[in-house]
Image (cartoon, helix red, strand yellow):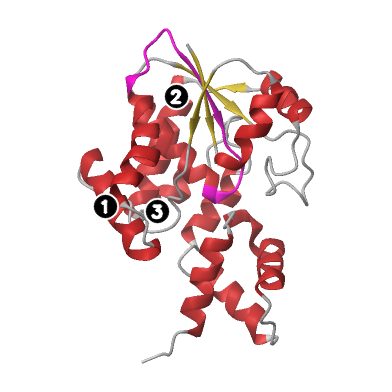
Amino acid sequence: MIYHVLPGDSLVEEFRRSGIAGEVIVCREALVDGPIDAENLDEFWDQRARFILSEFGDDQIEYHEKVANELDALRELTGHDEINLWFEYELFCSVNMWFCLSLLAGTDASVFRVEPIGLNELSRWDGFGQFGPDDLRASFELRTPVSETQQTHGVRLWNAYRKGDHASLDELGRADHNCYPYLREVVAAAIEQEIEPLETVRAITRTGERDFGKIFGEFKKRAGVYGYGDTQVRRLLDRVAAPTT
């Protein structure tokens, strides 16, 4: 079987229109936000469900059905299967992809990375956002095989990231694998994640800007490497606005 892991529901409709064969698995997680270090996978999913409930009020059962079970299916693949990971370059998507590679470890499935091709230096963090069916087909045709060594590297990146092991992240970020473009920039952002995004929002709001749309747009210009959506930026704004004690 051929499978495609898409980086969110927003890409599903355009992907369907592309006519690319295969079953769709949607990654609905945002592992750059909230707790991710757990003793085992069952505990991990429960931990994430509790976080989603506490921060956003979403139902834990629905989380397991729509998010956890969707991704957990990756562990059931075999050597007869092919999996295409449609992930963008920034930290948000990189972390999700590293996690997916950890789920695929030991499955013997053939793994490919599908990138948003044709983006220049200024737009490289925009990902598949403006891609239509033709663009998606072109990206799929130029997909990159992910070797066993490269898959292992992705798993190591995931483990270093979830544990906050900056020394290991820095070392892993120096590797040169064609399936991990911009890895050094992404790893550098990961190491500064607890400081840089918050300081960026703080600097923007110091100008007196209060319109969220403009704040979000400016954040993307200054810190696009993080790939944060409006949810993450709103949470940063809440932290900036919170009284200090």
Residue toward you, 48 or 144:
48
Q: Residue at x 38, y 15 (%)?
A: 108
Sooner in the amino-acid sequence: mark 3 or mark 2? 2
Find residue 167 and name its label. Answer: 3
Q: Is residue 88 magenta?
A: yes
Q: Residue at x 34, y 45 (%)?
A: 62
Asked if residue 124 shows in the view, the reply is yes
Asked if residue 173 shows in the view, the reply is no
- Which residue was labeled with disc 2? 149
Sooner in the amino-acid sequence: mark 3 or mark 1? 1
Q: Mark 3, mark 2: which one is toward the viewer?
A: 2
Q: Secondary structure at mark 1?
A: helix
Find residue 111 and name its label. Answer: none
Q: Amino acid at mark 2?
A: Thr
- Which residue was labeled with disc 1? 47
In the image, which residues are magenta?
76-92
Can you say whether 153 is above or below 214 in the image?
Answer: above
Q: Secondary structure at mark 2?
A: helix
Q: Mark 3, mark 1: which one is toward the viewer?
A: 1
Where is residue 219? Give x, y as percent.
66, 67
Where is residue 59? Give x, y as percent.
33, 53
